[in-house]
Image (spheres, coloured by chain):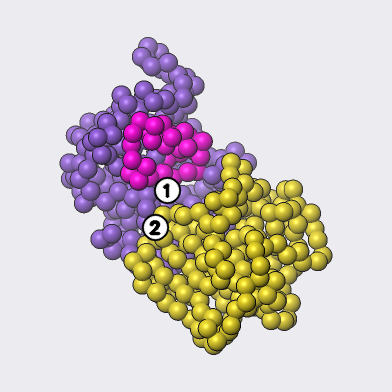
Chain colours: A purple, B yellow
């Protein structure tokens, strides 16, 4: 690993930093992007995450991990937070945190589920729901670096209204092919009926195994297990499949 | 310096000390996969190696010379017992890991006797884990992992490896002894992650 963003002293990398919310925007009815100004941000790669800490007046604190959504850009960091019903942290971040407010975060964390601009091989991104967030950071990092590595994105969501970053994904990004899959409700006239990701989806919209792509799969645990199993069955080398699972709880 | 979040407050019940499926015990059961190893303090060492193989080592005397903490924590064993308010003395992993150069996300813990267990590196940091060598005011008895064991009270107790010998930092997760044998890879008592698939 060549990048200085990855190789640093843990005590520095995992220091809590007070950062300020400078901008926010809705992605869907349940997901909101928060843009933070982070002093002394050490830099990051697409795919890494941060830990966020909230502290109550009585000293009680709660921490959650959130994937970084943005490419490296001058001390600004974007997180996209999906609302977790009954969650302790995500409803606060979405409903109560306002521009100018501070929270604490630390990171970047993660040295395995990352894409670096030196990589030139084909890349397959497989996203389930808000699992798109770290994969979008890779897409943005590719664009920012002017990389010509061929990317394909397979993005599985329940319904059209659940797609995040839709406007950006619809813009033509040379060398990036995006395929939307719908599991519950497809748009009118959509050629593929709503349903779970299957081997045919991966064969049609992914790369053949002999192209030796690096594959990044991110989403809820069940989705990731299922997708990774299908990829191995299709002949992809398990060592080229990198996964990140969302646990059953969150907040 | 802590940032207080206006309007943020605890939502979980405060008085529920028992994770789901657990019962309280007052004694201290012993569960091990094999015989208790015999360990000579003169040759005892604790090693941390990073992903490129660079290693730091502490002898028993060096470990004893490090600043220690005295955590009082609840323990939760996957076999369903929980024990409240146990008193320990040991060195925080924050102290041992502070100057380690690494981009690893995972730790594989090695014990005398060959036991291993894996956990995310994050779970060893930020005041969450210790190398413990005293229990309830006494040297840690061998059956409880003495002379020193890992103590990670927020995970099921099999992660708190007895007779700890070292930690290998790794870019990729590698299941340990019980994890390979079907126990959950993470082991959060509050999510009742006992076995694979939980």
Q: Residue at x 54, y 65 (%)?
A: B114
Q: Circle 1: is it few (<14), some (14-19), or many (20+) Cα within 10 Å?
A: many
Distance between the Cα atoms at labels 2 and 1?
18 Å
Q: Residue at x 80, y 58 (%)?
A: B24
Residue shown at the point (33%, 33%) measured from the top left? A235
Name the residue: 66% across, 67% down: B35
Q: Are marks 2 and 1 in contact (CB under 8 Å)?
A: no
Which residue, as the protein is rendered here, is positioned at the far right?
B26
Give, as a single range, the part of the protein colored magenta. A218-246
Residue A17 percent location from the top left of the image: 44, 64
Q: Position of residue B166 (x, y in %)?
A: 50, 71
Residue A216 occupies quadrant: top left
Question: In the rendered image, is residue B6 in sight?
Answer: no
The x and y percentages for residue A118 are: 21, 51
Position of B140 relative to A166 (above/below): below
Q: Is residue A233 left or right of residue B143?
A: left
Q: Look at mark 2 in the image and give the residue it sits on.
A: B171
Tag 2 and tag 1 share a subunit: no
Q: Residues within 10 Å of mark 2 (few under 14, many from 20)?
A: some
Chain letter of disc 2?
A: B
Do we see residue A203 in this rendering? yes
Is B81 included in the stretch rendered in magenta?
no
Q: Which mark is residue A67?
A: 1
Point out residue A215 in the picture as x, y percentages from the top left corner.
33, 40
Residue A37 falls in image quadrant: bottom left
Quadrant where the C terminus of chain B is found in the figure: top right
Secondary structure under tag 1 reads strand
Q: Is residue B174 left or right of residue B187?
A: left
């Amino acid at each position: 690993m060549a990048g200085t963003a990855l190789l640093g002293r843990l005590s520095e990398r995992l220091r809590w930093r007070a950062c300020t919310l400078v901008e926010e925007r809705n992605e869907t009815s349940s997901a909101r992007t928060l843009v933070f100004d982070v002093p002394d941000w050490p830099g990051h790669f697409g795919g890494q995450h941060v830990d966020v800490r909230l502290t109550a007046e009585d000293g009680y604190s709660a921490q959650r991990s959130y994937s970084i959504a943005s490419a490296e850009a001058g001390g600004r960091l974007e997180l996209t937070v999906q609302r977790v019903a009954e969650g302790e942290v995500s409803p606060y971040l979405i409903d109560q945190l306002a521009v100018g407010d501070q929270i604490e975060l630390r990171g970047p964390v993660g040295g395995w589920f990352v894409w670096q601009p030196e990589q030139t091989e084909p890349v397959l991104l497989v996203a389930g729901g808000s699992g798109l967030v770290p994969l979008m950071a890779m897409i943005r990092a590719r664009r920012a670096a002017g990389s010509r590595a061929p990317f394909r994105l397979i993005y599985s969501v329940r319904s059209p209204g659940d797609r995040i970053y839709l406007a950006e994904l619809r813009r033509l990004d040379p060398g990036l092919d995006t395929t939307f899959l719908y599991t519950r409700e497809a748009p009118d006239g959509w050629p593929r009926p709503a349903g779970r990701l299957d081997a045919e989806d991966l064969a049609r919209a992914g790369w053949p195994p002999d192209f030796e792509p690096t594959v990044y799969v991110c989403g809820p645990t069940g989705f990731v297990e299922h997708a990774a199993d299908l990829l191995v069955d299709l002949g992809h080398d398990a060592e080229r499949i990198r996964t990140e699972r969302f646990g059953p709880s969150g907040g | 310096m802590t940032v207080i979040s206006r309007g943020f407050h605890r939502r979980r019940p405060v008085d529920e000390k028992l994770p789901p499926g657990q019962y309280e015990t007052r004694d201290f059961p012993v569960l091990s996969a094999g015989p208790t190893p015999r360990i000579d303090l003169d040759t005892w060492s604790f090693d941390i190696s990073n992903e490129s193989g660079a290693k730091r080592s502490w002898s028993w005397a060096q470990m004893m010379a490090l600043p220690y903490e005295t955590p009082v924590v609840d323990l939760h064993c996957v076999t369903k017992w929980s024990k409240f308010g146990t008193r320990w003395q040991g060195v925080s992993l924050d102290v041992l890991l502070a100057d380690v150069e690494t981009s690893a996300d995972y730790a594989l813990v090695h014990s005398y006797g060959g036991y291993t267990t894996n956990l995310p590196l994050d779970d060893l940091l930020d005041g969450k884990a210790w190398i413990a060598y005293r229990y309830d005011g006494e040297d840690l008895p061998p059956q409880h992992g003495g002379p020193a064991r890992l103590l990670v009270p927020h995970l099921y107790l099999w992660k708190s490896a007895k007779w700890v010998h070292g930690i290998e930092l790794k870019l990729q997760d590698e299941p340990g002894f019980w994890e390979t044998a079907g126990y959950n890879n993470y082991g959060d008592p509050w999510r009742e992650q006992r076995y694979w698939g939980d």
